[in-house]
Image (cartoon, helix red, strand yellow):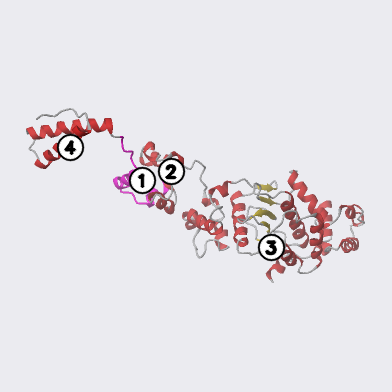
C-alpha cells in the first residue's frame, strides 16, 4: 500500500482510477486493500475540499427531501408557502421563495435559511397580500370568478387562486401585488375598506376593457365651457345615457358599477390599462342631482389631476374634504352645473320656493333637480324640494334600457 498526497490533477486522476479498482475488488474487512481504500478516499476528499468549490444545496430539492422525510403532501406545505397553486409554482420553480416563505419553512420545517435563499435578487421583500380580505362573496355574485360557486370557507381556501385569475384576465402587465399596494387617493373621513375599493376598481376596469372607443382622448378636451354644454343634456329623460355616449365620442369611458359594502363610494376617476380616462359611478344615491354632480366632479379630476402617476381618485361625496384636489374638483363641478354669477344672484336661495328653483334651472338650461340638490346641500336641509328631486332609481333605469 503506497498512498501519496495528491498534488496535481494527474495525481488526482491516478488516485480515482486506483479507488475505482479497489472498490471493484470488494475487499474483505480489515484487509490490506480495504485499509488502502479508506486511506485513499480520505486523501481524495482532502484534495477535493481544497480545489473543488462546494456545491450549494438546491432549495427546492431541500424542500422535497424534507417532505419525503416527514411524509408531507403538497397540501401540508400551504401554511408555509401559501395556496396550493403557489406551492405548485414554487416546487416547479416558476415562483421564487419570498422572505416570509423562507422564514416559515425555516421555523416550521427546520430547513436552514441559507439553503433556501438561492438568489437574494429573486426574493420578494414586499409584504404579501391577504387575499381572503377581499369581498369574495360579493365578487363571486358579480361573476368575477366565472362559474365558481362555493361557501365562505371555500372562497377563503381558493382566495389567492381566484383573485390571481381575475386580475390576469384584466391587464396581465398591470394587475398584481404591485397594483394592489399602490396608494389610493380617497375622499371621505369614513374608514373605507381599501381592498373592497380595489375590488370595485377592478370590476370597473373589467367592464372598461370590453369597450371600444372610436376616438382617442385629447388632453384639454374637458373645459368649463365643455362641461356646461354636457350639463344641458340633464334636461332629457335619457340624459345620463346621452352623457355616456357623448363622453365616448371624446375618448372618455363612463362606467356604472355598484359599490361594494364598506366602500362608501359615489364615484372615481381612473386610467385603464391603455391609459384611457375612465369615470366610474356607483349610483349609490340613484338620483338625478347626485348623478350630475358626481359626473362633473370626476370629470374635473380627469381634467385637473389625473396622470399616470396619480391614476386613481375615489370619492365619498357625502363627506366634505379639505384636500386641495377635492376643493378644486368641487368648485369646477359646481361652476359647470350652475355658473357662480347665476347662483350668487339666485332668488331661490332666499325664497326656497320650487317655482324659483325651476325658473333658475330653465334660465341655465339644466334639470331642476340639480338646483334643488345644490340648495339642499347648502342649507343641509335634505327634505327640501323633495318633489323636484324626484324618486330614487331615476338614473339606473336609463342605463337598463
Query: Magenta residues: mostly which secondary structure?
Result: helix
The answer to whether the residues at label 4 and label 1 have Cβ atoms under 8 Å apart is no
Q: Nearer the viewer, mark 1 or mark 3?
A: 3
Per the image, the residue denoted by label 1 is 60
Per the image, the residue denoted by label 2 is 101
Q: Element type at marker 4?
A: helix
> Considering only order in the chain, which callout, 1 or 4, is on the residue closer to the N terminus?
4
> Considering only order in the chain, which callout, 4 or 2, is on the residue closer to the N terminus?
4
Q: Where in the figure is residue 260, as x and y percent of width and height?
A: 62, 56
Q: Element type at marker 3?
A: loop
Count the labels in the image.
4
Q: Element type at marker 1?
A: helix
Q: Nearer the viewer, mark 3 or mark 2?
A: 3
Magenta residue span: 53-80
Distance from Cα at disc 1 to Cα at disc 3: 51 Å
Q: Residue at x 11, y 29 (%)?
A: 2
Amino acid at each position: 500500500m503506497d498512498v501519496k498526497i495528491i498534488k496535481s490533477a494527474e495525481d488526482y486522476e491516478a488516485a480515482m482510477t486506483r479507488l475505482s479498482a479497489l472498490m471493484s475488488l470488494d475487499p474483505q474487512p480489515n484487509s490490506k486493500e480495504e485499509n488502502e481504500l479508506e486511506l485513499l478516499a480520505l486523501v481524495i476528499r482532502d484534495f477535493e475540499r481544497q480545489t473543488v468549490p462546494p456545491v450549494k444545496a438546491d432549495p427546492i430539492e431541500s424542500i422535497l427531501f424534507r417532505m419525503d422525510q416527514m411524509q408531507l403532501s403538497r397540501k401540508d406545505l400551504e401554511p408555509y408557502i401559501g395556496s396550493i397553486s403557489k406551492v405548485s409554482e414554487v416546487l416547479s420553480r416558476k415562483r421564487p421563495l419570498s422572505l416570509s416563505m423562507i422564514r416559515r419553512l425555516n421555523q416550521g420545517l427546520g430547513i436552514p435559511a441559507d439553503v433556501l435563499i438561492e438568489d437574494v435578487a429573486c426574493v420578494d421583500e414586499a409584504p404579501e397580500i391577504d387575499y381572503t380580505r377581499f369581498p369574495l362573496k360579493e365578487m363571486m355574485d358579480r361573476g368575477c370568478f366565472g362559474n365558481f360557486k362555493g361557501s365562505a370557507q371555500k372562497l377563503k381556501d381558493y382566495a389567492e387562486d381566484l383573485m390571481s385569475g381575475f386580475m390576469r384576465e384584466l391587464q396581465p402587465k398591470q394587475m398584481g401585488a404591485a397594483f394592489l399596494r399602490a396608494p389610493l387617493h380617497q375622499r371621505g373621513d369614513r374608514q373605507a375598506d381599501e381592498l373592497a375599493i380595489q375590488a370595485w376598481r377592478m370590476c370597473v376596469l373589467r367592464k372598461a376593457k370590453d369597450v371600444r372607443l372610436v376616438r382617442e382622448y385629447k388632453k384639454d378636451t374637458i373645459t368649463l365651457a365643455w362641461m356646461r354644454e354636457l350639463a344641458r343634456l340633464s334636461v332629457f329623460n335619457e340624459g345620463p345615457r346621452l352623457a355616456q355616449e357623448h363622453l365616448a365620442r371624446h375618448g372618455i369611458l363612463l362606467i356604472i358599477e355598484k359599490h361594494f359594502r364598506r366602500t362608501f363610494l359615489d364615484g372615481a376617476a381612473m386610467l385603464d390599462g391603455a391609459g384611457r380616462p375612465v369615470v366610474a359611478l356607483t349610483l349609490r344615491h340613484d338620483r338625478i342631482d347626485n348623478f350630475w354632480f358626481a359626473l362633473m366632479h370626476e370629470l374635473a379630476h380627469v381634467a385637473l389631476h389625473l396622470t399616470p402617476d396619480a391614476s386613481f381618485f375615489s370619492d365619498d361625496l357625502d363627506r366634505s374634504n379639505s384636500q386641495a384636489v377635492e376643493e378644486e374638483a368641487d368648485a369646477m363641478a359646481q361652476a359647470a352645473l350652475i355658473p357662480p354669477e347665476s347662483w350668487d344672484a339666485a332668488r331661490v336661495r332666499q325664497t326656497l320656493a320650487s317655482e324659483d328653483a325651476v325658473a333658475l334651472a330653465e334660465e341655465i338650461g339644466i334639470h331642476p333637480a340639480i338646483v334643488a340638490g345644490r340648495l339642499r346641500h347648502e342649507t343641509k336641509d335634505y327634505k327640501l324640494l323633495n318633489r323636484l328631486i324626484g324618486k330614487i332609481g331615476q338614473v339606473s333605469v336609463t342605463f337598463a334600457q
